[in-house]
Amino acid sequence: MTAWKEPLRVAQSEADLLTVARAMVGGMSAEAVEPLLRQERPMARKLGPTAMGLLKQTLARGVALELGRRGGWRPSRHLRQGEVVAGRMWQRQPPQPLAFSPWSIALLRWLVASPLAVTTTCQPLSVKGAPTIADQLMMYLACDLALRCDCGGPLAASLAFRQSPLCWIGFPDLLGRGQPPEPDELTGEALDLLVQQGAFLLEALQQDLCRRWIEQERAKRDVVKLERMVALGQCQRAVLERLAAALERSDRRDLLGFALEAAGWLLRHRPGPIYWIRGIAQVGALSARQRAFREAAALLEALQIPARWVEEAQGVRFFDDEYAASQLLLAQWEQVGAEGLAHAQQLVQQIRALDAFVIEQVDGAAAPDQEVRQ
């Protein structure tokens, strides 16, 4: 006969924290926890042993499943010490330990206790010490949850999020609502550390990052404020340029594959320039519009960086040490290709032409409006 067990009991604030944690790792919908994020509520000074045990279980099981759902399930090829390995996330390498620190608990407490819907009164997240790679993943998931609940303002205003390279790579549109990253917010040292210690996270998140960058490009059509377009483009440009430099230093150019996949998806139907600037085509003074147009094409212009890599890779011979890495890069580049790059360059020139009427006349190409494949 099975012994009856008394149900576990936690305080209401602890239950709210566990609910948000489950939503972050895909165990609940964003709609179910949106009221918890948008309103201020009191929190106990610390988690009890029961709540702490349940939180550890939630993170231990949920994070691995969420990484799989966000792209780790997909067979892909990546570099290991100069050689190419293929398979799903768990097939390419042994399980990687994720060390969550008190930083993650402070993040969850802040998400539950703060009125994220009211940016003006919400205190920014402030935590002592540097987050671990696992803590940065929790911040990344928090950005995604807050964006879906339309309450990401306090995250963009928090230095803790603005100093996270993983958050910048995934959410330049969210963090850049105020201004582009300062040199001390998205540093080369932080990016190098992420690439060296968290490369497996960037591998697992490639599909999710591709989805995020496609969403950003599609959303540009609805931007109607010039300053908003300028901020978004500057953020994207800074993130891609600084990330590419870090990947070059670590010989992990394969980790920029998400940007190539996103660009290839956008360019495959050869959209016209109005696709990016429809909302600002007739807004503001000519000089201000010129700057906004230029920033709207940030991703298209950034393709010049991998294009340079590809040109170098084409000169690598089969007996060179870099041959495997160069062939992987060439395979990833096929998503854009020479024709896609040529079209991107043409788009940049047309977008900078500043003649919205002419742009509308020549824009007869289909726009990539279909749903992003999951």
Image (cartoon, rainbow, N blue to C red):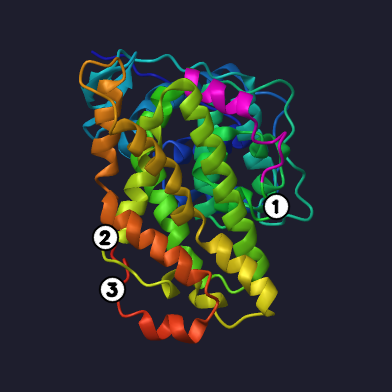
The residue identified by callout 3 is 366
Picture quadrant where residue 328 is located: top left
The residue identified by callout 1 is 179
Q: Is residue 12 magenta?
A: no
**Marks 3,2: beta carbons within 8 A:** no
84 up-or-down from 221: above or below: above
Q: Please state the horizontal and vertical placement of residue 173, each as a whole percent of the image.
A: 56, 53
For marks 3 and 2, give the CA distance.
10 Å
Amino acid type assigned to the residue bearing label 2 in the image:
Arg
Amino acid type assigned to the residue bearing label 1 in the image:
Gln
Q: Please state the horizontal and vertical placement of residue 16, each as a whole percent of the image.
A: 57, 39
Compare marks 1 and 3 and give the one earlier in the sequence. Answer: 1
* Secondary structure beneath label 2: loop
Tag nearer the camera, 1 or 2: 2
Picture quadrant where residue 289 is located: bottom right
Residue 15 in view: no
For marks 1 and 2, give the CA distance.
31 Å
**Marks 1,2: beta carbons within 8 A:** no
Magenta span: 181-196
The residue identified by callout 2 is 268
* Secondary structure beneath label 1: loop
* Secondary structure beneath label 3: loop
Amino acid type assigned to the residue bearing label 3 in the image:
Ala
Residue 50 placement, left or right of 120: left
Q: Please state the horizontal and vertical placement of residue 33, each as a whole percent of the image.
A: 51, 48
Tag nearer the camera, 1 or 3: 3
Q: Residue at x 50, y 60 (%)?
A: 297
Compare marks 3 and 2 and give the one earlier in the sequence. Answer: 2
- Residue 363 versus residue 2: which sits nearer the camera? 363
Q: Residue at x 30, y 66 (%)?
A: 270
